[in-house]
Amino acid sequence: MKNIRNFCIIAHIDHGKSTLADRLLQETKTVSDRDLKAQVLDDMDLERERGITIKSHAIQMKHHHEGEDYILNLIDTPGHVDFSYEVSRSIAACEGALLIVDAAQGIQAQTISNLYLALDHELVIIPILNKMDLPGAMPEEVKDQIEELILCERDEIIPASGKTGLGVDQILDAIINRVPPPQGDPKAPLKALIFDSVFNSFRGIIAYYKVIDGEIRKGDHVKFINTKKEYHADEIGVLKLTQEPREFVDTGNVGYIISGIKEAKEVKVGDTITLIDNPTKTAVMGFEDVKPMVFAGIYPVDTEDFEELREAMGKLQLNDASLVFEPESSAALGFGFRCGFLGMLHMEIIQERLEREFGMTVITTVPNVSYHAFNKRGEKIIVNNPTDLPEGSHLDYVEEPYINAQIITAGDYVGAVMGLCMEKRGQLKNQVYLTTSRVELTFEMPMAEVVFDFYDKLKSISRGYASFDYHPIEYRESQLIKLDILLNAKPVDALSAIIHRDKAYEYGKKICLKLKELIPKQQFEIAIQAGIGSKIVARETIKAMRKDVTAKCYGGDITRKRKLLEKQKKGKKRMRQVGNVEIPQSAFMAVLKIND
C-alpha cells in the first residue's frame, strides 16, 4: 500500500490538464506511442469536438522511481463549472491533487472553487505552472498569485508544458514524494467508496470504486450499503486504458466491479461496498446532494418514444449523477420529463448526448424554476411549469424562490458584476476584500434570473474570473405574470414563461422577432403574438409564400389579374384554417439565447 498514490488534476477550463495527462501517460509508458492521441482520456466525441472534459476518467499508471515500482491512479476531472459535481466525486477518491495554472492566464474562478473542494478533503496540493512555452507566459506574476492562494514556497511550484513535455519528470517525482499513500487497514472488513459508474450494453452497470479498508476478491459476495442490494463480484480489476481483470483489488487501490447489475437506480454514487460475511461497521460519508440550477422539460419528438427516452435518461443518469428528472406532460408536446441541470452548458451536453448515444431526437422547453402560487381561497399550488399557473381571476399572488449568491471576482470587475446583478433584480448585501485584488460580493436575488443566461454573462463581463455559488433562502412575493406565445391564435404551451411584469413586454417582443426569423414560411400568413391573459403585448407576422399566379397573364384587362389574385387569396384563407405550423427545435433553443 505504501507504493500506491491516488491523485486528481484540478484546473480551470482550457488550462491544459488533458494535454498534461497525456504526457504523464506517455512518460510512464501506460499508453504506447501508437495509441497516443490528443486528449487520450476524453473518449466521448463531444469532448473531443469541443475540447473540454465532461466526464471524470480514472486510469492507472506504473512508474519506476529510485529502484521501486509505484502504482499511480490518476482521476482526470472536468474544468467547466457546470461539471463541478464530477470534480467533487473525483476528489473524494484521492489523497493529492495537481493544481494546474496557465502561465499566460493566471489563477481563475474554477481553479479557486475546485481548490477549496480539495482543501476541504485535506488533499495535498502540488502547484504546477503550465504552458510555460507560450510567448505570453508571465511566470513570475502567476507564481505570486499561486503563493498568495495556497501559501506554498515559491520553489514548490513546478514549471511545466504539456506541449513540449517540460517538467513531466519533476511532476512524477513530486507525486511520489509529496502525496501520502492511502491510509487504510488491510486487515479490516471491506469498505469501498463508489465514485462513478458507467453503463455497458453487454455487461450491465460497471461501478468504479476506491478500496478504503480491506480488499475485494473475484467471486466475493458483496453488498451495497445504501441500496441494501447484494451481488456476486463476477469480475473485478483495475482501470488501465481498457479495463484489466484481476483476482483481487487491495487497500488504497482504485478499481471496477462487474456484477450483472441491470437497473440504474441500484447503483448510487457515494455508496459503500462491503462483504456480506464480514460487513464494515460504518459506511463512508457520501457526497453532498447535487443542486440543480436550471429546470427544463425534455420531450421526445414522437410521443411513442416516451419509454425509450425514460430508459435513455436512466442510463445517462448513471454516467452523470448530477442529472435529476421526473415525468410531466404538456398539451403541445405530450409526455416528457422535467429535468434539473447544473447549468446551460450541462443542459446542452445532455441533449446532445441523448441524440448521439441513444439516437433520441428531443425537444427542450424554456428553462425555469418552481414557484408557489396562491389562489383566492388561500390554497398553495406548486408551479413547476408555466401551464400550471392559475388564471388571473383565481390568482391572489405568486411567490418565487430567492437565493443568496456569493460572487468572487477581481477588483477590476466589481462595477460590471454589480451592474449585472442589479439588472437581474439583485440586492447587494455584503462586500468583502479577500486580498488586495479579490472581492467577495453577496447578493440576494431571484433564482429565476439566474437560470437563464446569468452565468454566461457573469463569465464574459469578468473575463472568466468570477466564481459563483449560491444557496436557496426563501420564497418571496413578486409581481409575476404568465406570458403566452400564440401562433395563429393557438397558444404554444412549451414556449410560455412566467416572468416579472416589468420585463414582459420587452421579452415578448424579442421572442416574437426570434420566432419570425426561425419559423419557415408557409403557404399562408402566420401571426406570432405574445399575450398576457387576453391582452396582446407584441406581434410579428410571417408573410405567406406566394406563387406568381399572374405570370401567365400578359396584356389584356387588369380585371383578369385581379380575378386570379382574389382566387389565390381565398385559397390562402382556407389553408390558414386547416394548416398547422411546425415549430423547429432551433426555435425552442433560440429562446434560451434570447438576450445574446
Image: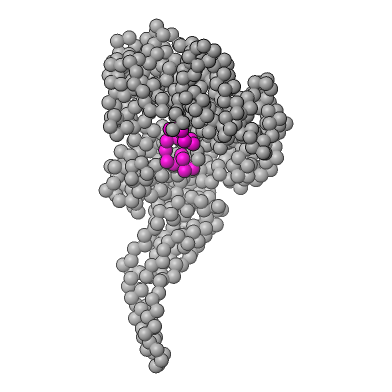
Using residue 59 as the reference point, say whether residue 154 is left or right of it: right
Residue lying at the far bottom in this picture: please name it: 556
- Residue at 36 percent across and 30 percent down: it is 198
Q: Where is residue 98 in the image (x, y as percent from the top left)?
A: 56, 25
On the question of residue 328 being in view, the answer is: no
Above or below residue 302? Residue 378 is: above
In the image, residue 243 lies in the stretch drawn in magenta = no
487 or 381: which is nearer to us? 487
490 or 85: which is nearer to us? 85
- Residue at 50 percent across and 40 percent down: it is 51
Residue lying at the far right in this picture: please name it: 436
Above or below residue 224? Residue 264 is: below
Q: Where is residue 508 in the image (x, y as percent from the top left)?
A: 50, 57
Q: Where is residue 176 in the image (x, y as percent from the top left)?
A: 54, 16
On the question of residue 279 being in view, the answer is: yes
Above or below residue 295? Residue 535 is: below
The colour scheme is one colour
Residue lying at the far front in this picture: please name it: 34
Using residue 287 as the reference point, say whether residue 158 is left or right of it: right
Residue range corresponding to the magenta coloring: 35-50
Q: Where is residue 175 in the image (x, y as percent from the top left)?
A: 55, 19
Residue 285, image quadrant:
top left
Using residue 163 as the reference point, say whether residue 235 is left or right of it: left
Prevalent SS, magenta region: loop
In the image, residue 49 lies in the stretch drawn in magenta = yes
- Residue at 34 percent across and 35 percent down: it is 315
Residue 230, image quadrant:
top left
- Residue at 49 percent across and 19 percent down: it is 63
Circle count: 0
